[in-house]
């Protein structure tokens, strides 16, 4: 396995559904085209934004298969989220991802029966990663959803001997002290992908090189400008873009983030369909009001 490092924006993509909630894999091609047009070169499929816990194992396999087909011959790179409360399912998905040629796999912690110690968490990750022995593995730390709270720098320390393919962490956590410890663990050998879009500028200041996020699906130009401004030392311009990100995410979150984000994708001509229960979807009136508010914010011009 070669050492992997992802830079720039990685879009955590939506899983597309028909109106009746069934998979609509025909839309994946449209999603891929949208990513390329937005200058996003890597996708992270089947994660939280992708409603992975609301998908069956065959649906997740079909989603990975379709993305691998659509991306063939394009500059896009594929990261497959394989985490599950059922480790056997996670291992099945990991093995498939390797067979499909994914650039990396990632898995969050089991969250119904939670690991009681960091050693057990590492054991779970090692079990999954072993099913894809030639593919880089990223642990997906998202404690606000899993309620599994352990030191990620300690995870890296313990995991480097137990998980030969360990490449880093998808760090979806606003604890920037912990993030900094991970960045500098083992002389900076790990790839620590930042996962909180609304705090990207702070992470860049600490040394972030790559970021995985849901709003990169529909607002990538904002973040490209943010990164470019930061790199040229124009913090005033970078802060302006970060504020736009915060305002956008706050608005969508007030309506139910997943359903609202999917509504925005529809407005941009990428019909990813509704969210599945237990996520909510916007009513017709809410969708109309959301578009009106976005227009008042000048959101659609932000994308130009």
Image (cartoon, rainbow, N blue to C red):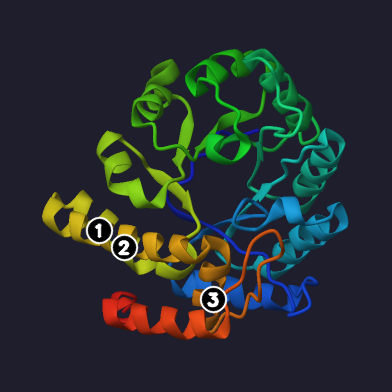
User: Which secondary structure, mark 2?
Assistant: helix
Residue at image point 48% right, 20% down = 153
Q: Residues within 10 Å of mark 2 (few under 14, many from 20)?
A: some
Q: Which residue is mark 3?
A: 263
**213 relative to 159, above or below:** below
Give 89 or 297, whichever is nearer the viewer. Answer: 297
Q: Is residue 112 found left or right of 221 in the rendered image?
A: right
Q: Which residue is mark 1?
A: 243
Is disc 1 in contact with disc 2, using a CB cutoff of under 8 Å? yes
**28 relative to 199, above or below:** below
Residue at image point 66% right, 76% down = 273
Marks 1/2: CA distance?
A: 6 Å
Q: Which residue is mark 2?
A: 247
* Coordinates of residue 131 in the picture (x, y in percent): 81, 34
Which quadrant of the view contains residue 239?
bottom left
Which quadrant of the view contains residue 300?
bottom left
């Amino acid at each position: 396995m070669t050492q992997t490092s992802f830079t720039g924006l990685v879009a955590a993509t939506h899983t597309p559904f028909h109106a009746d909630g069934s998979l609509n894999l025909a839309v994946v091609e449209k999603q891929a085209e949208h990513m390329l047009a937005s200058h996003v070169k890597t996708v992270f499929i089947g994660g939280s934004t992708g409603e992975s816990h609301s998908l069956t194992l065959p649906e997740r396999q079909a989603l990975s298969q379709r993305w691998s087909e659509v991306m063939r011959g394009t500059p896009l790179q594929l990261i497959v989220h394989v985490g599950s409360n059922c480790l056997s399912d996670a291992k099945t998905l990991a093995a498939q991802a390797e067979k499909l040629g994914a650039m990396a796999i990632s898995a969050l912690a089991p969250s119904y029966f939670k690991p009681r110690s960091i050693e057990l968490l590492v054991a779970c990750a090692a079990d999954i990663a072993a099913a894809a022995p030639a593919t880089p593995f990223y642990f997906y730390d998202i404690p606000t959803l899993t309620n599994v709270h352990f030191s990620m720098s300690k995870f890296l320390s313990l995991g480097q001997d137990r998980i030969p393919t360990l490449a880093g962490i998808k760090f979806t956590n606003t604890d920037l002290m912990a993030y900094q410890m991970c960045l500098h663990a083992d002389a900076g050998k790990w790839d620590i992908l930042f996962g909180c879009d609304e705090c990207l500028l702070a992470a860049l200041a600490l040394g972030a090189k790559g970021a995985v996020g849901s709003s990169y699906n529909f607002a990538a130009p904002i973040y490209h400008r943010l990164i470019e401004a930061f790199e040229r030392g124009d913090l005033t311009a970078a802060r302006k873009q970060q504020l736009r990100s915060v305002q956008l995410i706050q608005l969508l979150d007030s309506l139910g983030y997943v359903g609202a984000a999917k509504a925005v994708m529809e407005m941009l001509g990428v019909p990813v369909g509704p969210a599945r229960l237990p996520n909510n979807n916007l009513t017709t009136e809410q969708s109309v009001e959301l578009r009106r508010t976005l227009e008042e914010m000048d959101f659609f011009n932000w994308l130009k």
